[in-house]
Image (tube, grey):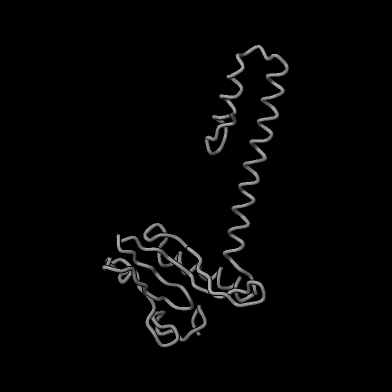
Amino acid sequence: MGILGGTSLNGLKFRGHKLLTEVKVKQAKPKSRSYKLADGAGLYLEVATNGSRYWRYKYRALVDGRRKEKRLALGVYPEVSLKQARDLHASAHAMVSRGGDPSALRQQEKQEARTCVQSFLTIGQDWFETQVNNSHPTPADAPKTRLNRASFFGGSLV
C-alpha cells in the first residue's frame, strides 16, 4: 500500500494509473480548453488556457444529508510544488475521511478573520469618537488618519 492508499511501484502508480511527476507538471502546456492532469484520490492539476496551473482536490461531503461533490483549491504551481500539494491533499483527504468538510472549514476561518477586522475597526471608531469628543489638542483629522493607516485593509472609517 502506498501513502495515499493505492498500490505503489516506486511511488509512480496509484490504483492502476500513473501518478504525476514534477517533469509532467512542468511540461503541462495550455491548450484551447482547460484540462486536468490526475494524480490520484481526487488530487489533480488544472491547466488553464492562459497557462496557469492550479492544484485542486475534488471530493464528496455531506451537505444537508446528501453527498455533494466539492472542489478545494490547494494552490498555484510553481508556488505550491507537487510534494506540497500532496501534503495539503493528504490532510484535506484525512478530514474528509473523518466526515469533515475542508472547504467549509476554510470559509469559517475567513469569516472569523473578517469579524476580527470588523472588531478592530469598531474599536477604532469608538476610540476616534472619544478623542474628538474630548477636544483632543491635535487637529480632528489626525486621529482618524492614524487609525486609517493602522487598518489592515486601508479601509476608510468615514
Q: Closest to the observer: 43 or 26?
A: 43
Q: Quadrant of the C terminus?
A: top right
Position in image of residue 25 (x %, y %): 33, 68
Q: Residue furthest top?
A: 137
Q: Residue at the spot x=62%, y=17% of the render?
A: 140
- Quarter of the image where one finds residue 10: bottom left
Position in image of residue 119 (x %, y %): 67, 40
- Quarter of the image where one finds residue 150: top right
132 over 4 or under it: above or below: above
Task: Give the total number of marks visible in the rendering.
Answer: 0
Asked if residue 34 lies left or right of residue 1, the reply is left
Q: Closest to the observer: 30 or 93?
A: 30
Position in image of residue 63 (x %, y %): 63, 72
Q: Residue at the spot x=47%, y=63% of the render?
A: 74
Asked if residue 150 lies left or right of residue 55, the reply is right
Asked if residue 144 lies left or right of residue 23, the reply is right
Position in image of residue 87 (x %, y %): 50, 67
Q: Residue at the spot x=72%, y=23% of the render?
A: 130
Q: Residue at the spot x=58%, y=19% of the render?
A: 142
